[in-house]
Image: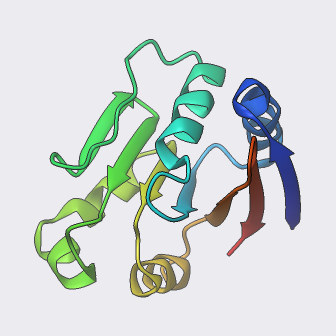
Amino acid sequence: MKKIFRANMDELNIVANYLNRTLPKDAIIFLVGDLASGKTTLTKAIAKSKEVDSEVTSPTFSLQHIYSNDFFHYDLYRIDYIEFMQLGIFEEFNKSGWHLIEWGDDILKSFLKNAGYNIFTISITPHENSREYIIKKS
């Protein structure tokens, strides 16, 4: 599975709707992109499409935001795989729903894939007035 979208801010609902139609109800989604590429912005669009009422912000300092019983958002910018495991956050992935991860490393992705989780990657590349979103099963 691989899908490519090019969308501006007003078209993010197209990407979110595709994800809702395509991804299973339990998925771990790695959001990959440079600083300010739009990872949290995409998360906001996905949350809106799932009718999440909470304000979506980057969990940079808290590491995790739980927006509903089945929508979770992580920012692992400051921690590596070993620290992530030591903090016990890994157990959160056993909760049913979508887990969106910003700044997750390849070691974590490989571990989760080998543990049998549904892993997807969305790579985000900024362009002048839009972003390219490459969605693939990892």
Above or below, comparing residue 93 to residue 6 in the picture: below
Image coords of residue 111 (percent x, y): 44, 84
Above or below, comparing residue 8 to residue 117 in the picture: above
Q: Residue at (16%, 48%) from the top-left corner?
A: 61
Kindly give the residue lying farthest to the top in the view shown.
53
Position of the C terminus by quadrant = bottom right
Front-lying residue, 13 or 68: 13
Q: Residue at (86%, 66%) from the top-left corner?
A: 2
Q: Quadrant of residue 56?
A: top left
Q: Residue at (75%, 24%) from the top-left corner?
A: 10
The number of discs equals 0
Q: Quadrant of residue 59?
A: top left
Above or below, comparing residue 19 to residue 111 in the picture: above
Image coords of residue 4 (percent x, y): 87, 58
Image coords of residue 115 (percent x, y): 48, 79
Front-lying residue, 38 or 80: 38
Q: Quadrant of residue 1?
A: bottom right
Q: Residue at (76%, 35%) from the top-left corner?
A: 8
Judge left or right: residue 110 versus residue 92. right
